[in-house]
């Protein structure tokens, strides 16, 4: 069964946007919950879940 690229391409593009956004946020953030290099590895190597985890628990709360 061939892959339908019309269905897969938008998911790949959204995943790339999420990864890039999470990496930029991680680099700009002054303080994170844990070392920045660990979060960068999680964002890059745990596809889709890594960036979501960073935005949920990786960033320190402001205030």
Image: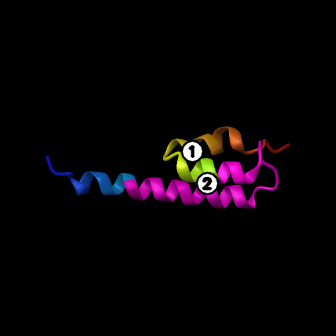
Q: Residue furthest top?
A: 57
Residue with the mark numbered 1: 50
Q: Residue at x 39, y 55 (%)?
A: 12
Q: How is the image coloured?
A: rainbow
The answer to whether the residues at label 2 and label 1 have Cβ atoms under 8 Å apart is: yes
> On residue 11, which mark appears?
none
At mark 2, the secondary structure is helix
Q: Nearer the viewer, mark 2 or mark 1?
A: 1
Q: Residue at x 57, y 44 (%)?
A: 50
Compared with residue 52, is residue 6 higher up or lower down, i.e. above or below? Answer: below
* Residue 54 falls within the magenta-colored stretch: no
Q: Residue at x 54, y 55 (%)?
A: 19
Please tell me how crowded label 2 is: few (under 14), some (14-19), or many (20+) other residues with Cα within 10 Å. many
* Disc with the residue nearer the chain's start (2 vs 1): 2
Q: In the visual, does 3 lie left or right of 49? A: left
* Residue 27 falls within the magenta-colored stretch: yes
At mark 1, the secondary structure is helix
Q: Residue furthest right?
A: 63
- Could you say where residue 18 lies in the image, as x and y percent from the top left? 52, 54
Residue with the mark numbered 2: 22
Query: Magenta region: which residues?
Result: 12-40
Q: In the visual, does 51 lie left or right of 35? A: left
Looking at the rendered structure, the number of numbered marks drawn on it comes to 2
Q: In the visual, does 18 lie left or right of 28? A: left
Compared with residue 61, is residue 5 higher up or lower down, i.e. above or below? Answer: below
Q: Residue furthest left?
A: 1
Q: Dominant secondary structure of the magenta stretch?
A: helix
Q: Residue at x 49, y 47 (%)?
A: 47
Q: Nearer the viewer, residue 49 or 25?
A: 49
Residue 5 occupies quadrant: bottom left
Residue 52 occupies quadrant: top right
């Amino acid at each position: 069964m061939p892959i339908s690229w019309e269905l897969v391409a938008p998911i790949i593009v959204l995943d790339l946007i999420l990864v890039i956004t999470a990496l930029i946020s991680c680099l700009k953030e002054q303080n994170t919950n844990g070392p920045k290099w660990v979060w960068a590895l999680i964002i890059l190597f745990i596809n889709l879940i890594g960036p979501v985890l960073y935005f949920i628990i990786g960033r320190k709360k402001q205030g």
